[in-house]
Image (spheres, rainbow, N blue to C red):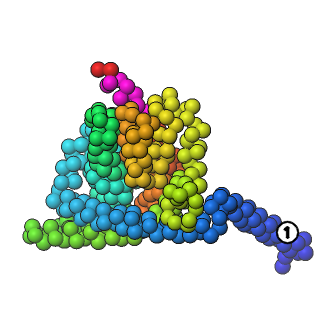
Amino acid sequence: MATFDEKRETLRQQRRETGKKLTKSALFLVAFCAFMALFMVPMGMTNAINTMMNTAYRILLDTVFYIMAIAVLAGALSEMLTEFGVLELFNFLLSPLMKPLYGMPGAAALGVVSTYFSDNPSILALAKEQQYRRYFKAYQIPALTNLGTAFGMGLIVTSYMAGLSAVTGTRLGLAVLCGNLGAVVGSIVSTRLLLRSSKKLYGTETLALSPREMGQLTDAERQRKKGFMLRLLDSLLNGGKNGVELGLGIVPGVLVICTVVMMLTYGPSASGAYTGGAYEGIGLLPKLGDRLQFLFKPLFGFTSSACVSVPITALGSAGASLGMVPELLREGAAGANDIAVFTGMCMCWSGYLSTHVSMMDMLHCNELAAKSILCHTLGGLCAGVAAHWLFVLLSMV
């Protein structure tokens, strides 16, 4: 039986543990209240709460269902390419390029193509396929998030920026090209930095698939139907089904993170007052960008401090950031060099604060989510710097 001193010591230890838990709870409550006050003081409590709900609803309709549609199509496409051996061909042909640049197998290039023509989460439709994962080692899987995000909405951003030639009256082809090259530089930096961390966590020898999963794949390949049409239909439908599951899985992360980022980025309504409508906020991130203009000017060569708002808005939504560019061009606050930087940073970042956490969660790599965001932040900055100086150098030719 425990002595009186032992019981008293046990009781003291329990009290200390309880005290620590209560302290942590109190600190969290204070931090949460301070964070909510950040929105409620300038916006008003009712307006802030209504804006949160309305913004989340609009994101669900405008963004999440769009991402789900992309995931369904990308899943169907990836399953079809895998079924008929195209993925294996990609891996063979592009390994000499992808390995020295990114430290990734050649099959990763298919993820680049899928995100460039759609959006960040489309690479998850590939990463969920065991036929795709067989080419990767465990430490390379988390880096797919950074690699794919660096090219998210690439075609949309490129086409949109090139089309702004009508606004400026000058050709922007060189600027857009430099922006795409800058995004490549940013993707290499982001992917390589994350691989350094993932190697320490997972090692360099563990495969993404276990021996049992590899065996199941081999058995499935032996039992595969021989009819072309049956194989085609099965691959399209099974891949689309995986896309639906993926689209549902990213809903919580996208809604929560994107709502907060939007409210930190946008300001009041067009009338200058808070109405509780969607996409209103306190405009904190652009204000921080203005304070850092002394640093951004030599790095990115921005024409004016107003240009900072474009890449900062791209942290939450690349589509939203694109809408700011025409007005900057009309006012003379941005030029061709800025278009190069906007293209590189909007493509490389492409709303990664809104999607990165949910993407890492879908890959079961939550322990690397914070490092992934940090690495991609640095990658986006490098993309902007590279785009600026590439444009300066090529303009001299």
Q: Residue at x 39, y 53 (%)?
A: 319
The magenta stretch spans residue 43: no
x then y, percent, for residue 23: 77, 64
x then y, percent, for residue 321: 43, 49
Q: Amino acid at mark 1?
A: Arg
- Quadrant that contains the N terminus: bottom right
Dot 1 falls on a residue whose secondary structure is helix
- Horizontal side of 91 relative to 345 (left or right) equals left
Nearer to the camera, 390 or 264: 264
x then y, percent, for residue 305: 52, 37
**Where is residue 383, by image quadrant?**
top left
Q: Residue at x 52, y 66 (%)?
A: 277
Look at the image and tell me whether residue 134 can be seen: no
Q: Residue at x 19, y 71 (%)?
A: 234
Q: Which residues are magenta?
A: 383-395
- Horizontal side of 152 relative to 45 (left or right) equals left
Residue reaching furthest top? 397
- Horizontal side of 35 relative to 246 (left or right) equals right
In the displayed structure, 258 sits above or below 166; it is below
Residue indicated by mark 1: 12
Q: Magenta residues: mostly which secondary structure?
A: helix
**Where is residue 346, by image quadrant?**
top left
- Horizontal side of 351 relative to 282 (left or right) equals left
Nearer to the camera, 237 or 179: 179
